[in-house]
Image (cartoon, rainbow, N blue to C red):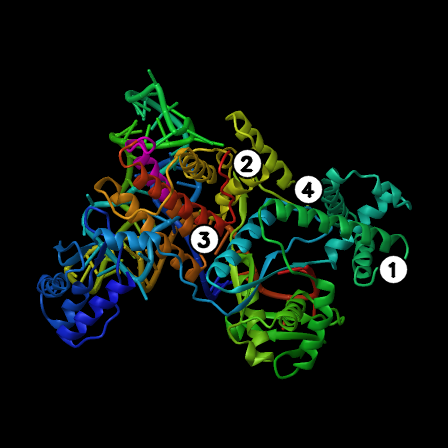
RNA sequence: GCACCCGUAGCUCAGUGGAUUAGAGCAUCUGUCUUCGGAACAGAGGGUCGUACGUUCGAAUCGUACCGGGUGCACCA
């Protein structure tokens, strides 16, 4: 395809002395395999009719004898149809790594300890991990990291409820069984939030407890803090692994980032930050963000300072070429300010950090709120999927469930809110992760059945053409997805590919057919392509399910 | 108030730097098949692409205005 566009580009240079970018499209198969509207674009500049230009360009293209046909359609589109050899080359082509040699840090999960993990965290972790997969597929060396808020008000709220619950004896907390940890933390946080809102004296107490989180006082506080922190990280790690995420190589904490951040802010005042009323501020409004306080007048580092500190911690450890932070889109303007400030502090960081905004998970059944303890737990989601698969007579595994869940979040474009309907999510038909996993298992089942040696196809028979053409789009789609860091392109494509194959195999029997050897080769190529695409999405492709 | 994002079929969403007849899935209805795994396949109905102007040979896509929904805007995270 790049090949064809550069061929046309040369033709245009020769014919008209103009050097233009030639963009190719994948039209409906009835029109051809590639199409370009270059003659319509040139018509104005050249003062000629688009059809005349199309005639001249397509004439030159046809002369090359490399294409099955070159036709002009409508007002002047040039439709190109490939021959069998070209189609097969595309179908077998792998993806080209464009980020080889780069080291990239990506934050692939960031739930806070002392709170419960829920479906929103799951979406963020899945999207972030898949973006990392795309970067890795593009040749980069990935350093997946996590970042967690171990200090601040939310800790104070939870500690208040926890201390209450313990009543002086940490054993009461230890008695909570492991399977209940997440729910327990959720409940504690909700309780703390409630009294913080309703009870003035408790509010003062919680503020004090929050303050203490920066240096947990030895004794019951520190013991509970340590215990629950451990519980939280155990839960987070387990849940994230269950979702199919690759493991992380570093865990950063706000407490560590805080110290570094405050130093950075102070040492870059007044050149970057300004002191205002005792606080250290950054005038982000000059950089498309908003003016924001980094260090409070009390001397306390705020979230912004910590993010600055975090950047430095990442840089010291990994010296990355790029660093990706995937967060809710409501933090977009905020990160614009942080990144602008960081680049002013150290101009060598220009363009290094990129914030990718995601949307919110909205439940079709109503609002979710950590403060009220009304959340959708990840374990519950797995149970729902499990029930659905069982009711179909299948055997649910975490791999299969995680795949189905990942697909739900990945099939839509990153950035928009996701309306999550549990009934729709656990459905196994149509455009779902299950459809793809199942499609893959069926293909593998054919391959297990043949007694012939599996070889890559060498020809394209008329009945295969659509399937081979579709297979050839794989590398192009992955290229777009990794360039734009948009996984949904791969989802859309894989679904179309599976549909194309399912139609093919409905009509063309493989085992026992006169062309079994050839068709087995096609099935193998298809199964391989499907598996590779799913792997980028972090979705397992079991041979049986 | 200022800024940003979004509005495509009943629902959930695709639609790459403008283009040949606006596409899927779900839901609804109708078929296929003694199934290389039916978690499938074929087909039907369903759209003034929020509204109105504008630019163009051509607009879901670009521009302006308006309507409707969401988010962000200094010591929370």
Q: CA distance from mark 4 to mark 3?
A: 32 Å
Q: CA distance from mark 1 to mark 4?
A: 28 Å
Q: CA distance from mark 2 to mark 1?
A: 42 Å
- Side (left or right) of A319 relative to A457: right
Q: Position of residue A61 (x, y in %)?
A: 15, 63
Q: CA distance from mark 1 to mark 3?
A: 46 Å
Per the image, the residue denoted by label 3 is: A487
Question: In terms of secondary structure, where does tag 4 sit?
Answer: loop
Question: In terms of secondary structure, where does tag 2 sit?
Answer: loop
Question: In terms of secondary structure, where does tag 1 sit?
Answer: loop
Per the image, the residue denoted by label 2 is: A365
Q: Earlier in the sequence, mark 4 or mark 3?
A: 4
Q: Earlier in the sequence, mark 2 or mark 1?
A: 1
- Can marks 4 and 2 be said to lie on one chain? yes
Q: The magenta stretch spans which residues?
A: A496-512
Q: Position of residue B15 (x, y in %)?
A: 33, 52
The image's mark for residue A217 is 1
The answer to the question of whether label 2 and label 3 lie on touching residues, with beta carbons closer than 8 A, is no
Residue A83 included in the magenta stretch of the image:
no
- Can marks 2 and 1 be said to lie on one chain? yes
The answer to the question of whether label 1 and label 3 lie on touching residues, with beta carbons closer than 8 A, is no
- Side (left or right) of A174 relative to A301: right
Mark nearest the camera among 2 and 3 is 3
Vertical placement of residue A312 versus B30, above or below:
below
Mark nearest the camera among 2 and 1 is 1
């Amino acid at each position: 395809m790049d090949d064809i566009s550069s061929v046309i580009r040369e033709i245009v240079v020769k014919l008209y002395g103009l050097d233009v970018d030639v963009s190719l499209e994948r039209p409906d198969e009835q029109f051809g395999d590639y199409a370009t509207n270059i003659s319509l674009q040139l018509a104005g500049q050249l003062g000629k009719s688009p059809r005349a230009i199309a005639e001249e360009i397509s004439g030159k293209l046809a002369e090359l004898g490399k294409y099955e046909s070159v036709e002009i359609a409508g007002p002047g589109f040039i439709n190109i149809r490939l021959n069998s050899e070209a189609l097969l080359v595309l179908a077998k082509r792998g993806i080209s790594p464009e980020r080889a040699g780069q080291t990239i840090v990506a934050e692939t999960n960031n739930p806070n300890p002392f709170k419960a993990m829920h479906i929103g965290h799951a979406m963020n972790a899945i999207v972030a991990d898949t973006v990392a997969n795309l970067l890795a597929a593009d040749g980069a060396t990935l350093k997946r990291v996590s970042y967690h808020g171990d200090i601040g008000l939310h800790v104070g709220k939870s500690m208040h409820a926890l201390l209450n619950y313990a009543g002086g004896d940490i054993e009461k907390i230890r008695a909570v069984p492991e399977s209940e940890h997440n729910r327990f933390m959720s409940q504690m946080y909700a309780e703390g939030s409630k009294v913080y809102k309703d009870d003035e004296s408790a509010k003062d107490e919680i503020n004090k407890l929050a303050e203490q989180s920066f240096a947990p006082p030895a004794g019951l506080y520190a013991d509970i803090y340590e215990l629950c922190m451990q519980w939280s990280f155990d839960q987070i790690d387990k849940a994230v692994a269950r979702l199919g995420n690759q493991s992380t190589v570093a865990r950063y904490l706000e407490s560590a980032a805080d110290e570094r951040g405050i130093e950075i802010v102070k040492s870059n005042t007044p050149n970057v930050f300004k002191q205002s009323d005792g606080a250290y501020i950054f005038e982000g409004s000059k950089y498309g963000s908003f003016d924001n306080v980094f260090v409070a007048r009390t001397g306390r580092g705020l979230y912004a300072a910590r993010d600055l500190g975090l950047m430095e911690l990442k840089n010291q450890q990994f010296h990355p070429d790029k660093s990706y932070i995937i967060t809710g889109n409501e933090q977009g303007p905020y990160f614009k300010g942080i990144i602008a400030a960081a680049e002013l502090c150290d101009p060598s960081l220009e363009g290094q950090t990129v914030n990718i905004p995601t949307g919110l998970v909205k439940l079709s059944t109503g609002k979710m709120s950590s403060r009220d303890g009304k959340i959708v737990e990840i374990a519950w989601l797995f149970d729902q999927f499990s029930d659905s698969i069982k009711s179909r007579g299948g055997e649910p595994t975490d791999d299969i469930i995680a795949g189905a869940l990942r697909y739900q979040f990945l099939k839509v474009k990153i950035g928009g809110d996701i309306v999550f309907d549990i009934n729709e999510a656990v459905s196994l038909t149509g455009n779902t992760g299950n459809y793809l996993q199942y499609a893959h298992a069926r293909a593998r089942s054919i391959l297990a059945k043949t007694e012939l040696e599996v070889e890559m196809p060498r020809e394209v028979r008329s009945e295969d053409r659509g399937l081979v053409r579709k297979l050839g789009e794989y590398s192009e789609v992955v290229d777009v997805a990794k360039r734009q860091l948009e996984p949904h392109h791969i989802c859309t494509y894989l679904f179309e590919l599976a549909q194309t194959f399912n139609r093919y195999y409905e009509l063309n029997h493989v085992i026992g057919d006169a062309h079994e050897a050839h068709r087995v080769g096609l099935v193998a190529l298809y199964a391989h392509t499907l598996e590779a695409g799913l792997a980028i999405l972090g979705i397992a492709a079991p041979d049986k399910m």
